[in-house]
Image (cartoon, rainbow, N blue to C red):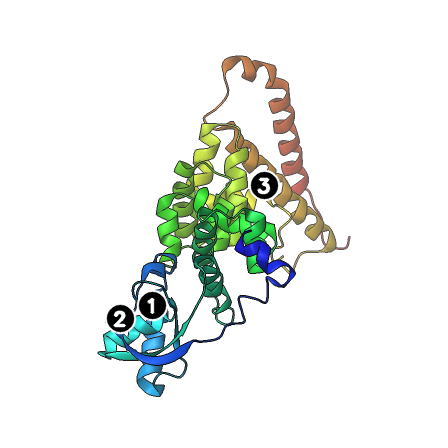
């Protein structure tokens, strides 16, 4: 029977409850760091911990797992350990407990519920549990999480380009933005992530960028989306609110809104057409282009005919 099955219905609470076999001062070099492979704290957070240790000292013990052979393996306190080394400290207070390898991983999440691991760290823990033989459902039971939570975390590692995984570990890429890129082939994930960063796009805008790129009807249209991300997004949403000139009459505001919609539609059409049409298509669409030109000329003439406001 797996650890998850033994924990049963109380799985969400069991990892939270733990008791120390002993608490003692231990030298920094006497702690094992095998589980450091699932931790990637950003340097800024370590710096914050360092200042706190220097000002207030150690307030709570680190947590380590006792092993039948070898040194205790650190479960919680990686940032404090790193900060203590930078401060030149030789020892820290450590609470030692007994746990199976599977429960030890679950404890890493439970012990960080207050401040939280990053989503990429959660994903690394989940992957370790799955590699240990648990199914996604069993991992969810063990951690007190829904199976969709488990699958989302695994997706960040299994489908995300390695370069972007490293960016997430360093805090350079938001998990929300990373998830929006998962629908793309790995090679294109890096390209569009770079585009989104340079354009200063948020998570929702990145999602729209990815949608437009995937739905682009030609290579030229995709290139336009990449080269002009904000313009492409704006053209796809002509109904987005803009400040209207307060001097416009009610009719003027009505025309303004529809002109914006028409301009956005024409811009989108030009984007989709890419480098142009073949001669056969041009011949077949000649009447439509002529009709468009007539309507544009008619609108231009009407715009120049108006009289005084209110007449």
- Separation of disc 3 and disc 1 at Cα? 63 Å
Which badge, 2 or 1, is on the more N-terminal residue?
2
Q: Are marks 3 and 1 in contact (CB under 8 Å)?
A: no
Helix, strand or loop at disc 2?
helix
Above or below for 214 versus 17: above
- Separation of disc 3 and disc 2 at Cα? 65 Å
- In percent of width and height, residue 259 lies at 64, 43
Residue drawn at point x = 36 percent, y = 81 percent:
52
Residue drawn at point x = 53 percent, y = 39 percent:
212
Picture disc at residue 30: 2
The reply to whether residue 129 is in sight is: yes
Which residue has dot 1 on it?
Answer: 72
- Separation of disc 2 and disc 1 at Cα? 8 Å
Instruction: Name the outermost residue toward the left.
Output: 88
- In percent of width and height, residue 107 lies at 48, 65
Q: Are marks 2 and 1 in contact (CB under 8 Å)?
A: yes
Helix, strand or loop at disc 1?
loop
Judge left or right: residue 253 versus residue 153. right
Closer-to-camera residue (7/280): 7
Which residue has dot 3 on it?
Answer: 264
- In percent of width and height, residue 104 lies at 45, 62
Residue drawn at point x = 36 percent, y = 53 percent:
167
Question: Which numbered mark, 3 or 1, is in the foreground of this view?
Answer: 1
Q: Examine the image and state in which quarter residue 250 appears.
A: bottom right
Question: Which numbered mark, 3 or 2, is in the foreground of this view?
Answer: 2
């Amino acid at each position: 029977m797996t650890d998850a099955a033994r924990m049963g219905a109380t799985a969400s609470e069991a990892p939270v409850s733990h008791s120390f076999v002993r608490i003692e001062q231990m030298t920094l070099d006497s702690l094992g760091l095998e589980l450091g492979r699932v931790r990637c704290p950003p340097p800024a957070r370590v710096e914050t911990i360092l200042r706190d240790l220097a000002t207030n000292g150690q307030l709570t013990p680190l947590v380590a797992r006792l092993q039948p052979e070898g040194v205790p393996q650190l479960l919680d306190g990686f940032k404090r350990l790193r900060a203590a080394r930078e401060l030149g400290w030789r020892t820290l207070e450590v609470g030692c407990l007994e746990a199976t390898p599977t429960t030890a991983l679950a404890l890493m999440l439970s012990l960080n519920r207050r401040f939280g691991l990053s989503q990429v760290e959660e994903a690394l823990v989940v992957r370790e549990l799955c590699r240990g033989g648990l199914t996604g459902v069993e991992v969810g039971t063990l951690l007190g999480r829904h199976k969709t939570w488990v699958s989302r975390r695994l997706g960040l590692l299994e489908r995300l380009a390695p370069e972007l995984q490293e960016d997430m570990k360093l805090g350079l890429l938001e998990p929300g933005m990373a998830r929006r890129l998962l629908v793309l082939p790995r090679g294109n994930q890096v390209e569009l992530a770079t585009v989104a960063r340079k354009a200063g796009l948020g998570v929702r805008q990145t999602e729209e960028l990815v949608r437009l790129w995937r739905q682009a009807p030609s290579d030229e249209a995709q290139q336009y989306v990449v080269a002009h991300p904000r313009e492409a997004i704006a053209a796809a949403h002509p109904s987005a609110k803009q400040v209207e000139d307060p001097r416009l009459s009610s009719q003027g505001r009505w025309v303004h809104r529809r002109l914006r919609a028409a301009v956005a539609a024409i811009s989108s059409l030009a984007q989709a057409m890419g480098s142009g049409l073949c001669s056969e298509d041009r011949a077949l669409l000649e009447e439509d282009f002529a009709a468009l030109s007539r309507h544009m000329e008619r609108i231009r003439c009407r715009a120049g005919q108006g009289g005084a406001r209110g007449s």
